[in-house]
């Protein structure tokens, strides 16, 4: 491993300053992804800015009914929080579907959002990868791409985002709070991650010198029935082949609110806006769910070996939507 400087930040401002003034610096929280990438030689930070002791480790209920989650809250603590389990169950389910118990005890909310793709061409420094080394090519496009994107990919990159948690945050209309030299700002979780285009090396809209300080779950989705479901190659400790997070509110036999996001289909959690628009105002029937999901997935452009993802995602979404509305249909 290469040598690097180490800074233990004692405040959010100090962490942002260190990131802004030290080119190539990276935040170190739980380290469950960054340290692995450093061992592989994919990440070679000149400085590690340790943010693990910042006062960002609390889950706070806001008077307006929303919930603020600090960036260093551990995944296991967030999954087990009684308010999350009761009012935003899709988030708890997504967290518990990710990684192992040991990893969830170390991984943080901010780190989960910022984790990088598990594409083997990205993780192998002997292979071409535009995300790791811009302009070097994409080895996956004509190589092994069974697990790769079917939506939103480009000629430059077909990698998928690995997070389960981020899929739920997208469907639940969460917002990501950031802090940098220009002060604090927040962005919708559904817009936090980027599609690859011709700049696949940029995973998110975070600007240089900014850090993630937290996530806010809005009151508008609190208590609305929600769920997360994931298909993978084995029962535990595997990344998704396809996943879906959804929430559905039904009033007087009509869908009045819908939030749907797919995981493992694209470079970012794929918010299914077309499906949501098709569902609002419709009766909660299986036919309506199939129509809406087909409408969304009609944009898919599968590659040689991953066309199976489209019917897999369709089945997951229709099943989740049907289960969420079962009580309203009886």
Image (tube, rainbow, N blue to C red):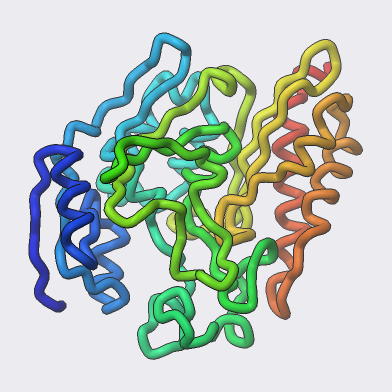
* Residue 243 position (above or below residue 132): above
* Residue 43 position (above or below residue 21): below
Quick check: 77 left or right of 47? right
Quick check: 318 left or right of 101? right
Q: Quadrant of the C terminus?
A: top right
> x%, y% of residue 104?
33, 45
Q: Nearer the viewer, residue 286 or 27?
A: 27
Q: Nearer the viewer, residue 103 or 208?
A: 208
Q: Nearer the viewer, residue 273 or 321?
A: 273
Furthest residue to the bottom? 126
Q: Does the rendering let one see residue 109?
A: yes
Furthest residue to the front? 182
In the image, what residue occupies the spot 33% across and 35% down? Answer: 184
> x%, y% of residue 305?
69, 77
* Residue 21 position (above or below residue 136): above
* Residue 232 position (above or below residue 181): below
Which of the 4 image quarters holds residue 302?
bottom right
Q: Quadrant of the N terminus?
A: bottom left
> x%, y% of residue 278?
84, 36
In the image, what residue occupies the spot 60% across and 33% down? Answer: 227
> x%, y% of residue 66?
46, 19
């Amino acid at each position: 491993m290469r040598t690097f400087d180490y800074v233990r930040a004692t405040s959010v401002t100090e962490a942002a300053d260190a990131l802004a003034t030290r080119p190539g610096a990276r935040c170190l929280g739980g380290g469950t992804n960054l340290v692995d990438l450093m061992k592989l030689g994919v990440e070679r930070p000149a400085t590690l800015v340790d943010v693990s002791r910042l006062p960002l480790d609390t889950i706070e209920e806001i008077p307006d009914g929303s919930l603020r989650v600090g960036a260093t809250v551990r995944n296991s603590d967030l999954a087990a929080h009684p308010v999350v389990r009761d009012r935003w169950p899709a988030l708890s389910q997504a967290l518990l579907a990710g990684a192992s118990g040991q990893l969830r005890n170390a991984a943080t909310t901010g780190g989960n959002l910022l984790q990088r793709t598990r594409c083997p061409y990205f993780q192998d420094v002997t292979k071409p990868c535009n995300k790791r080394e811009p302009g070097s090519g994409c080895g996956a496009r004509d190589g092994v791409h069974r697990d790769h994107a079917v939506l939103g990919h480009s000629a430059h990159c077909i990698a998928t985002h690995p997070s389960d948690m981020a899929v739920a945050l997208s469907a639940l209309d969460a917002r990501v709070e950031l802090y940098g030299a220009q002060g604090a700002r927040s962005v919708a979780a559904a817009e936090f991650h980027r599609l690859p285009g011709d700049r696949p090396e940029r995973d998110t809209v975070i600007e240089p010198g900014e850090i993630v300080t937290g996530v806010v779950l809005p009151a508008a989705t609190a208590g609305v029935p929600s769920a997360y479901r994931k298909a993978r190659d084995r029962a535990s400790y595997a990344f998704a082949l396809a996943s879906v997070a959804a929430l559905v509110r039904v009033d007087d036999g009509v869908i009045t609110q819908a939030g749907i996001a797919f995981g493992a289909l694209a470079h970012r959690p794929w918010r299914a806006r077309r499906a949501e628009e098709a569902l609002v105002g419709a009766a909660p029937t299986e036919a309506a769910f199939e129509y809406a999901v087909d409408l969304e997935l009609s944009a898919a452009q599968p590659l040689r070996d991953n066309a199976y993802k489209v019917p897999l995602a369709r089945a997951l979404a229709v099943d989740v939507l049907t289960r969420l509305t079962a009580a309203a249909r009886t």
